[in-house]
Amino acid sequence: MPHTSSGIHWEEHGQGPSTVVMLPGFGASADLMAGIARHLDGFRVLIFDLPGHARSVRAPADGRLPSLAAILHEAIKEAGADDYCLVGYSLGGAIAVRIALDHPDEVRALIGVVPWNAGGTTAEDAVIAGFDAAYGDVEALTHAVAAISVDPSRTSGLTSSMLTVTERMWHGWLAGGALTSQADELPGMRVPTCYLLGGKDVVVDQAKQLDDVRRIPGSRAVLLQELGHLCGLERPDVVAYEISAFLRRTAPS
């Protein structure tokens, strides 16, 4: 699979007149989004490993949204996409928001799947602090992944992916980037936006996600009542259905 000049790994799935760019969540690899892409019909899908993750470990990664978004935007352009729908999962959702704010003429539609809320969090956030402290600890990460899962039998592989994340990226996001806010910029969003929320998500505060939706003009939220933060691994078919429904309604080819 190809890498960009900055070291970002990307892969292509499917065919169609519209291009969908997919960004995984923190600790996950492109495999997370590939599982969803298998249920998307009629789209050309480009999936990127995040900087400092999986097959993008050599790409610069400081864990800060502006720099993560900038390097991924350049990678997307280098992969040949200049007019695309953008799907971001968790941290990938926050990065996608940054890209859409900075490059609204290139992004046709934006979908956040259990997206990290734009307002960020605080150092007292127990879930985020727990993951930060668990860097490189297989046992601790295994327990942490199980704790945020609705169906742990489908999510155990995430631990291996988390172990690939560089230390600078890990702490840069969990002890830094996750605490920053881009919420005040959301009223200026010019891209049709939808958030897919998990009713059993114990990682991201749903009230904060809904605050994002209220701030973005014309945006909508879909509550998947029985799904949690790892819904992309547990029910990729449901996630793909909602992505496809929004894109076909909002950004038809």
Image: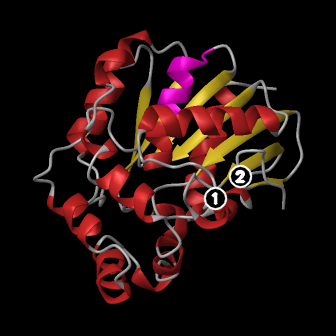
Left or right of 71 in this view: 188: left
226 relative to 160, above or below: above
Q: Which mark is residue 139?
A: none
- Residue type of the residue flagged with mark 1: Arg
- Residue type of the residue flagged with mark 2: Gly
Q: Which residue is mark 2?
A: 7
- Residue 102 seen by the camera: yes
Q: Is residue 62 magenta?
A: no
Start-end of magenta stretch: 96-104
Which residue extends farthest bottom?
Answer: 139
User: How many C-alpha atoms fall within 10 Å of the one at disc 1: few (<14), some, or many (≥20)?
Assistant: some
Question: Residue at (72%, 39%) from the top-left corner?
Answer: 75
Question: Residue at (58%, 63%) from the top-left corner?
Answer: 236
66 relative to 115, above or below: above
Circle 2 SS class: loop
Please tell me which residue lies in front, 22 or 253: 22
52 relative to 140, above or below: above
Left or right of 250 in this view: 155: left
124 relative to 234, above or below: above
Left or right of 38 in this view: 160: left
Q: Which residue is mark 1?
A: 58
Question: Residue at (80%, 36%) from the top-left corner?
Answer: 78
> Where residue 56 sits: x, y (%)?
65, 58
Which residue extends farthest left?
Answer: 124
State how far apart marks 1 and 2 are (Cα).
6 Å
Tell me which numbered mark, 1 or 2, is placed earlier along the sequence: 2
- Residue 104, by quadrant, is top right
Secondary structure mostly seen in the magenta stretch: helix
